[in-house]
Image (cartoon, coloured by chain):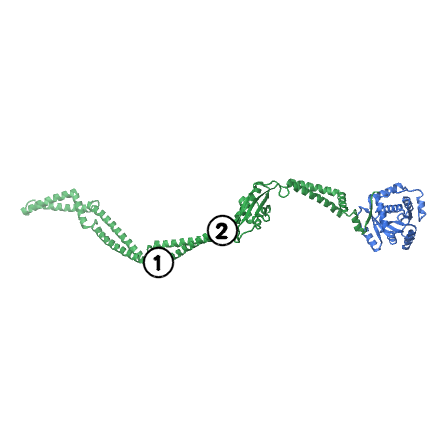
Amino acid sequence: MKRISLVLDTILRRWPVVAVTLGLGLIAVYFLFEHVPREFQASSHVLIMSESDGRDPTVTSLDLPAVATSTVVLSHVIDRLKVNMSVIQLQKAIKARVGARSSIMEISYRDSSADRAVAVPNAVADELSNYYDEISTQRADADVRRLDVTLDQTRRRFFQINNRLAAMTAQNTALGSEHAFEALSTRLDDLEAQRGIANATLQGDAAGVGALSPSSPAVAKIARHEILAGDEYFRTLVTGTSKDKAELAFDRAQYTDRLPGLRELQDKVAAENALVASQRERLLHDPDAFSAAQAQAGLDSRKAQAIVDGDKSRVSALDSLISGINAQLGTLPAASARYAWLRLQRDAAQADYLTLSARRTSAEASRAEALSLGSVVVIDRAVRATTAVVGMGRSSLVAVTAFFVLLISFGMAFAAEYFDPRLRRADQIENLYGAEVIATLGKH
Amino acid sequence: METILSPEQHLLRSSIESALDTPAVLLVTSARARDGKSVTSYDLAESLAEAGHRVVLVDVQSESPAAWALARRAAPHNVSLVRMPMAAGDPRSSRAAVANFVRDLRHSFDFAIVDGTTFLGSAAGLIAGAVDGVLLTVRIGRRQTEEDAVMVRSLAQSNTRILGVVAVEAERIASYERARAERFEPAADDAAAGAAYVQVAGA
């Protein structure tokens, strides 16, 4: 009682200190009330379903709050909602807790935005569920990924070998067959026979070209006859000359050389012969002289030459084929051995691929089994955010703060009392003098 | 004339009665001036006298005849008043003289209350060694000073019995001084009365 009285006395004596501190504190509380942002809170709930029989390598209910607020899950939440805050900031605003002997975890979140206050706990619940599945199947997923890589490598190796085999087969068609040597030999014989025929044909056709040449004697003779016969003046000269020569021959047979006019006739025939000869020479050497037989012979000769050229090409092609087959026959042993080795490699790659496929199927089965062992199911999604400030609420916060301000003001009174060097209380005096205060004389 | 005592006076009296066997001589002193020595002395003397004790009030402060006369007139009606000036060079200032003086007081009174000077004055220290106990006074609200510490150390070294501390409100001291100044105007014969060097007055 005495102590209470002492406290009250001190407070009353120091009322200016109390009043000033209280006033300043209440002003601060007012500004706090005005400037504390309104916050919203919402919660979602997840059910932890565990059917673990000891094989589940993942987490327990006790670990789940830590998983829910882990940086991995929260990073996914930030990416998903595109919120502009760090993982640390998000982590501070999220509370995840599991009640005692409960399999339900509450995820609560507070934010100045009501929409975000609803969206974040839902996103955390979803991402937690996904992440739980992910870490449950982590080992199987790793196996599947590793097998996928190996399968891809094996497949590519298979196709590389296959392409090389195809290229070898394209170069040497006999490589694919079991009787490559016999096949090549038969083919070589056939080609050599064809080359023999082609050579004979070539020679025959070449001979025809010589016969059909415009410069051959027969064609030249026909051509000269056609040129001379085609000239009317020359024919007239020849006719006149023939008539005079016939008359001269007649006269000589009937008469002597003394027959008057014989000499003149002889001279005339001689002159006409000279003229005919001269005209023949001129016609035969005329560059514009045309002979149908000679022109036809030129065409025929070129056709025959084209046939000869074709024959030569065929012979040349057959020679190439024969030399190629000869080369194939020469390299056949080494190529066959490499071809066989590549085929073995391809078969091995194919077998590997089949084995890996079987293992991948097994890994997928393991993953499905891991998924069935336990899961986190969202059972209650946040729908609406409460408008109250998280914790005690703004009014309560202000009331509590005001209460603390009052306490602080009282504390200031006691502090002022403590540091005041003036002697006011009995205990101060007793401490100073080491003797009891036996009376206090007041106003009387 | 019957005096009405305050509860504080009763409390103070009962404390002194229980602390000391009669006859007893006690010194009222303080570390600093205006700490309520006279108020306490007068109140205590008055209350003890009201209880039927033979009480004498020893004044060591009134060094002038006028002051002594004033003190004498202000003393309670049923309390004897003795002047004991303890100025430097006074033959009574010796330890033996003080002891004799105190012994004489014991023979004549149940309680002798010495309204002393501040403790750091030579007289108070001298008297403290001879009396049965010392009653300290302090004015409530004054600052703690070096004199307080020196006094406590001196009392501890002299093995003086401290009866207790009386805390006196500043207003009580002021009202006492004001009442004394208003009620007891100096009289014309005060100087003559003081000059007579009266040892015992009113007895």
Q: Mark 1 lies on which chain?
A: A
Q: Name the residue under label 2.
A: A369
Position above or below: A30 against B30: above
Residue A76, horizontal then vertical, whole percent: 54, 47
Q: In this view, does A60 lie to the left or right of B194?
A: left
Residue A329, horizontal then vertical, whole percent: 31, 58
Closer to the chain start, of discs 2 and 1, is 1
The three-letter amino acid code for the residue at tag 2 is Glu
- Based on the displayed image, in which of its 4 quarters is residue A8 positioned? top right
- Compare residues A146 and A292 and report the one nearer the observer: A146
The CA span between labels 2 and 1 is 50 Å
Q: Chain A is drawn in which colour?
A: green
- Compare residues A166 and A119 and report the one nearer the observer: A119
- Asked whether residue B121 is in view, the answer is no
The three-letter amino acid code for the residue at tag 1 is Ser
Query: How many badges with numbers are in the image?
Result: 2
Q: Which mark is residue A308?
A: none
Position above or below: A130 against A340: above
Badge 2: residue crowd in 10 Å (few <14, some 14–19, many ≥20): some
- Compare residues A376 and B159 and report the one nearer the observer: A376
Q: In this view, does A1 lie to the left or right of A179?
A: right
Badge 1: residue crowd in 10 Å (few <14, some 14–19, many ≥20): some
Q: Colour of chain B?
A: blue
Q: Is residue A439 left or right of residue B92?
A: left
Q: Contact (CB < 8 A) between labels 2 and 1?
A: no
- Based on the displayed image, in which of its 4 quarters is residue B50 positioned? top right
Residue A268, horizontal then vertical, whole percent: 11, 45
- Asked whether residue A18 is in view, the answer is yes
Q: Mark 1 points at which residue?
A: A336
